Amino acid sequence: MDAALCAKKLPAVISSLMGVFASSQKSVIQEAGDSLLKLIENSVTEGLIAQTEAALNSKVPKKQRALTPLENIVNTVEGGLSPRYQSSWDDILLLIASLYEVRTLLSLSLPFLLSLSHFFFFFLFF
C-alpha cells in the first residue's frame, strides 16, 4: 500500500462515505462506520500526523494555507455531528474516538473539543 497515495485520497473517501450516516438503515450505517474505522486505523500514518503538526506549528495562518489531508478528515468527521446525522451520532463518535486513538487529534484537539462543547451546549439548552 502506498502511504502517500492513501493520505492524498483518504479525505475524499471519508467525505463521500459520510453521506451514508444520513441513511435510515442502521445496518448500512454500522457497516460504513466499521469501514471508516478501519480506513482511519490503517491509513493515518505518523507522516500524516507529522505533516499536520508541522502545518499547525508554522507561522502561516490557517486561512492562508491549504488544509492538510488530516485536517480535512477531522473537519469532515466533525461535520458528522450536525443535526442531519443525529441518528448516527453514536457511530460518528466512534470515528472521533478512533482519531484520538491513532493520535491524530493531538494538536487539533482543543479547537475540536471547544466546538464540540459549544455544539452540545446548544442542543442541551436551546
Image (tube, helix red, strand yellow):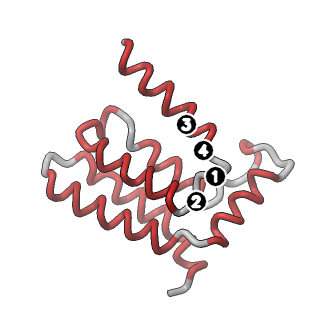
SS category of the residue bearing label 2: loop
Q: Alpha carbon of mark 4 to alpha carbon of mark 1: how far?
A: 6 Å
Q: Residue at the location (63% across, 47% down)? A: 108
Q: Alpha carbon of mark 4 to alpha carbon of mark 2: how far?
A: 10 Å
Q: Alpha carbon of mark 1 to alpha carbon of mark 2: how far?
A: 6 Å
Identify which amino acid the numbered label 2 is placed on: Arg
Horizontal and vertical percent position of residue 92: 35, 48
Identify which amino acid the numbered label 4 is placed on: Ser
Q: Marks 1 and 4: in contact by CB < 8 Å?
A: yes
Horizontal and vertical percent position of residue 36: 37, 63
Q: Alpha carbon of mark 3 to alpha carbon of mark 1: how far?
A: 11 Å
SS category of the residue bearing label 1: loop
Q: Marks 2 and 1: in contact by CB < 8 Å?
A: yes
User: Which residue in the protein does label 4 denote?
Assistant: 109
Q: Marks 4 and 3: in contact by CB < 8 Å?
A: yes
Q: Residue at the location (65% across, 54% down)? A: 67
The residue carrying pointer 1 sits among few (fewer than 14), some (14 to 19) or many (20 or more) residues within 10 Å by Cα, namely few
The residue carrying pointer 4 sits among few (fewer than 14), some (14 to 19) or many (20 or more) residues within 10 Å by Cα, namely some
User: Which residue in the protein does label 2 denote?
Assistant: 103
Which of the numbered marks, if any, corresponds to residue 113?
3
User: Which residue in the protein does label 1 denote?
Assistant: 106
Q: Alpha carbon of mark 3 to alpha carbon of mark 2: how far?
A: 15 Å
Identify which amino acid the numbered label 3 is placed on: Leu
